Amino acid sequence: MNKNSRKVRTQLKKGHQGRQRKGDLTREYREHGFKEGHTLNDERLSGKGELTRHRTVIGTAVSEEHDAIQLQLEIDESRCIRGRVLSVHGLECLVTAEDSKTYRCTVRGLLKNLTTGQRNVVAAGDLVFVRPELTTDAGDLNEGMIVRIEPRYGCISRTSKGQQHVMVANVDQLVIVISVLEPEIKPNLIDRFLVTAEKVGCHPIICFNKVDLIDLAELQPLAGVYGQLGYTILFTSVETGQGISQLKSVVKGKQNVVVGQSGVGKSSLLNRIQPSLNLRTNTVSRDNQKGRHTTTAATLIPLEQGGYIVDTPGIRQFQLWDVIAEEVAGFFRDIRPFVNNCKFPDCTHLHEFPCGVKQAVADGLLDLRRYESYCQIQTDL
């Protein structure tokens, strides 16, 4: 046993068994009435799945800042091999391992039960330990089981039905792709990604794609605001090749993830960066200005120039995860300097007066659209 490992009493995911009753009490009462001395103490009114489940396991506690399973399980590492998750498809994951093999893996049942607040157990980019398994299948892929997930950093997550949906783990750059036309720009979606990047410590890159479709001067009011805040801004076009070399340079040797709406051209940009990928692409519907999903699951792609990039499915909404109202202003680089000018220390910058942030908007020191975006995020939390 590892000297840092110890027995830990931990909470497991609740079961999903619904409420059950042994009999139809209403019909019984109507037909026979209740007998004298009859008791309902033996009647179950809640399902077993609603009871809290605990188990004692051997492992090492993990800091919450890693945004992962809060227990690193004790395993026999001599029987396992370290790898990184390429993609997740239902109950199976593809993992590239240190032995240069790709494994088709299931996930250890205990790991599933430990993810009490997460929608998914494993995400693209996860560092894992795989226990290879013997198989009689003559297929191209090796079989294995993921028995441990290493502590995470740089998790891009969103809220899904009240739970954490980890889109990708272990990235240090977030490439936000925006189409300047078809589909139309959603500035608030950009700001939500930026808040997440600030929260988890990822370097954000804002990539305005399809710039061959408009005059660049039209982008200045929006791109200029982000540029003045110190964000890296790129202007790209798959058709003309503009900005492709710059994009290729900034992702080189980094752990990247590309995010954005459907139809903004994420897969097309990756094909230009690395033509051998030959990723499937699609067009945008002219009726509703919405892209068609061509990437159906987050997929990690090793880059020939070093590092990797994770291609993600298109996103139409992005509900922030683990962000509270009191800290949102601190994640807006342009709002942060004016917070200390507020009269009240707990000012939300929405309805209080006097408010240093609202005064900055009135004085033209803070972009009105950015402030309105802040208000929308606050309202949604």
Image (tube, rainbow, N blue to C red):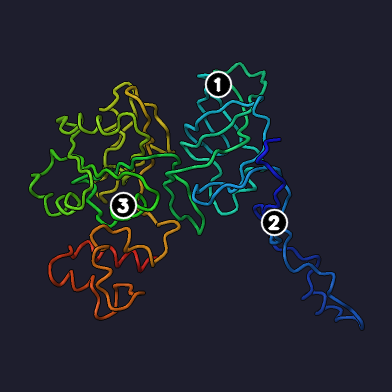
Identity of the residue furthest to the bottom in this view: 36
Identity of the residue furthest to the front in this view: 3
Camera-nearest label, 1 or 3: 3
Camera-nearest label, 2 or 1: 1
Quarter of the figure with the C terminus: bottom left
Q: Residues within 10 Å of mark 1 (few under 14, many from 20)?
A: few
Asked if disc 2 and disc 1 are in contact, CB closer than 8 Å, the reply is no
Q: Which mark is residue 194?
A: 3
Is 213 left, or right, of 60 in this rendering? left
Is 334 left, or right, of 157 in this rendering? left
The earlier-in-sequence mark between 1 and 3 is 1
Check disc 2 and report the residue beneath it: 17
Task: Classify mark 1: helix, strand or loop.
Answer: loop
Check disc 1 and report the residue beneath it: 141
Task: Classify mark 2: helix, strand or loop.
Answer: loop
Identity of the residue furthest to the right in this view: 36
- Tag 3: residue type? Leu
Determine the residue positioned at 60% across, 33% down. 146
Residue 128 in percent (x, y) is at 55, 34
Camera-nearest label, 2 or 3: 3
